[in-house]
Image: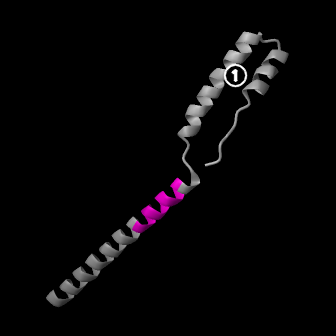
């Protein structure tokens, strides 16, 4: 997965230019960096979604085939009874 970068220095400098104190700007940049890092680890990748969709498609195909087989068998059984 591609890494998403967060420039803490640029963020802190932007805060400083807006009048935020040096200590507060750096603390906020570090805190935001930590939050973003935790949330990025929980992101679902495209490859994961593709794999899950393929698995779902396979399961649905198997279930549909099973239902079709049971339905045809039931029709044959009913035809023989009548």
The answer to whether residue 1 is left or right of residue 71 is right
Image quadrant where residue 34 sits:
top right
The answer to whether residue 35 is left or right of residue 60 is right
The location of residue 55, given as percent across then percent down, is 43, 62
Give the residue displayed 54% in from the left and 47% down from the top. 44
Furthest-left residue in this view: 81
Image quadrant where residue 36 sits:
top right
Can residue 82 be seen here? The reply is no
Give the residue displayed 26% in from the left and 76% down from the top. 70
Q: Residues within 10 Å of mark 1 (few under 14, many from 20)?
A: many
Report the number of numbered marks. Answer: 1
In the displayed structure, would residue 46 be above or below residue 4?
below
The residue that mark 1 highlights is 29
Give the residue displayed 24% in from the left and 82% down from the top. 73
The answer to whether residue 75 is left or right of residue 3 is left
Can residue 27 be seen here? The reply is yes
Q: Which range is magenta?
A: 48-58
In the displayed structure, would residue 62 be above or below residue 10?
below
């Amino acid at each position: 997965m591609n890494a998403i970068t967060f420039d803490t220095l640029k963020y802190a400098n932007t805060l400083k230019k807006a009048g935020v104190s040096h200590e507060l700007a750096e603390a906020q940049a570090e805190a935001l960096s930590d939050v973003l890092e935790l949330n990025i680890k929980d992101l679902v990748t495209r490859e994961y979604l593709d794999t899950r969709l393929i698995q779902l498609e396979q399961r649905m195909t198997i279930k549909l085939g099973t239902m079709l087989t049971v339905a045809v068998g039931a029709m044959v059984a009913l035809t023989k009874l009548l």
